[in-house]
Image (tube, rainbow, N blue to C red):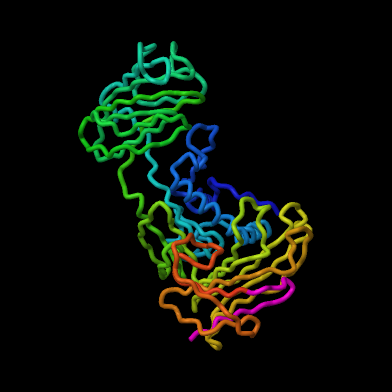
Amino acid sequence: MRIALVSGVQNIEGFDLPFFADLFKIAVHVILISRYCTNTVRRFREPWLYDGETLEIVREYELMRYRLLPYLYAKAYEAYATGEAMFRSLALDFPDDEQAARKDEYLFGNDLLVAPIGGVVPTELSESDYTAPVYVTFYDGIEAKGSSIASATWNKVLLNLRHEPPMEGVPVYHFSAKIRTKIKFDRPMRLYVKSDDGVTVFVDGKCVLEDNDMHSAILFPLDVLSPNEEHDLQIRYFQGGGEAFLGLYAAEPKDESEKEIYLPEGRWMDLFDGTVYAGRRTIRKRYGLRPMPLFVRLGALIPLAAPAQTTKDQSWETLVYDFYPDRQGSDAGYLYEDDGETTAYQTGEFSKSGYFAKYSEKENAFVVNFRAAEGSFQGDRAVKQRKITLKYHLLAGADRVARVCVNGRETPFETREKACVFPLNTEIPAPDGAVLAVSFEAETANNYVVKFYLV
């Protein structure tokens, strides 16, 4: 079965949300850098054209997406077989909870909750925001120097050209302009300019932006302007080639780092800091550039594969299962596998290896079952043996583990302290707290039972 791993916007039961890799940040730092296609000249797609920190953050989320492929692949198969969406509204899983009917967060399967930070969406300045005409003077070349070649008076700052000149006497490409006007708002507003290629902006004589690069259109935040005051605005713009865009926008200033998140029934943990929250409540949290609102349902068992550059390069001969124990929570799912290339799965050529996890009060142990594979398929992806590492997250305040047994035999394990790493990783350390890990070789034709006996 082939599935597309793409950034962008997916339709989730009637409303649009960024794909969480939009993997997750798939809302915030990228929003996701690929929200607009390059050929529409609205926004960069390539993260390396931003700063180094943004590039590293995007890389982390992209690698997370590949690590989650076993989880994602099973959910994609369920969508194919049953029609159940892998990205869906909270209301579908919690129909009796009125607060779950929100459009700013979603479930990825039944174990992960994503609440993208979409940021402020400014609106274009209306003609009533201008208190003076917009005077525009055009120049040949990109330096806005020498004798002007044309001039015009506009009602507002808006230039949107698709391989055409802004007016008679001005070339299609390689021109520049000086723009001056005055604006006024009745409340505090942050000013934005959206521009392709270079733009320099002065507000009340102060330079608030100087961009001399050639690029597709980017929205630049500027200063917050005081209300009921007339502000003098001067802009220098140049068009180097391709399509041309220049416009002014504004939005009420707000703290974009704080996010309101509703958590439905159950217990949920923030995967970036390990804080556990009881469900059926709304929380507010601040997020920096790197983390985002990403929560796991306690009791969850999530399969992960080693990161890779492409899906063809990724091998599932080694898998890591992230287990988030909870006495009141449990989980059940399966690892779905096929040849990854053809439609042979439609005629039954695939395998499903079930797994489930729960707390056994009788044994005072958390029990994780890995079932033998059912079904078969041909190809290099069909494996008869794999290494499984089971990561037991030692949540704050949780019971200590006395010993671990695999199929009744006591097995050594290792523990690692909390580390500053990205969540849902295939290394042993985790950002949410200490981790206990046990590894073993597993024949895909056999059953395995792992028991974590508590003190």
Q: Nearer the viewer, residue 234 or 428?
A: 428
- In the displayed structure, 226 sits above or below 114; it is above
- In the displayed structure, 307 sits above or below 160; it is below
Location of residue 427 by image quarter: bottom right
Please state the horizontal and vertical placement of residue 447, each as a whole percent of the image: 69, 77
Left or right of 391? Residue 269 is left
- Residue at 79%, 60% in the rendered image: 378
The residue furthest left is: 229
- Residue at 20%, 35% in the rendered image: 228
Which secondary structure type mostly characterizes the magenta part of the structure?
Answer: strand
Location of residue 77 by image quarter: bottom right
- In the displayed structure, 125 sits above or below 102; it is above
The verdict on residue 441 being magenta is: yes
Please state the horizontal and vertical placement of residue 15, each as a whole percent of the image: 51, 49
Location of residue 334 by image quarter: bottom right
Q: Nearer the viewer, residue 111 or 368?
A: 368
Left or right of 420? Residue 86 is right
Can residue 98 be seen by looking at this rendering? Answer: no
Q: Nearer the viewer, residue 271 or 57?
A: 57
- Residue at 49%, 79% in the rendered image: 327
The verdict on residue 69 being magenta is: no
Q: Quadrant of the N terminus?
A: bottom right
Please state the horizontal and vertical placement of residue 225, each as a whole percent of the image: 25, 37
Q: Which residues are magenta?
A: 440-455
Can residue 3 be seen by looking at this rendering? Answer: yes
Please state the horizontal and vertical placement of residue 63, each as a whole percent of the image: 55, 54
Left or right of 399? Residue 233 is left
Number of marks drawn: 0
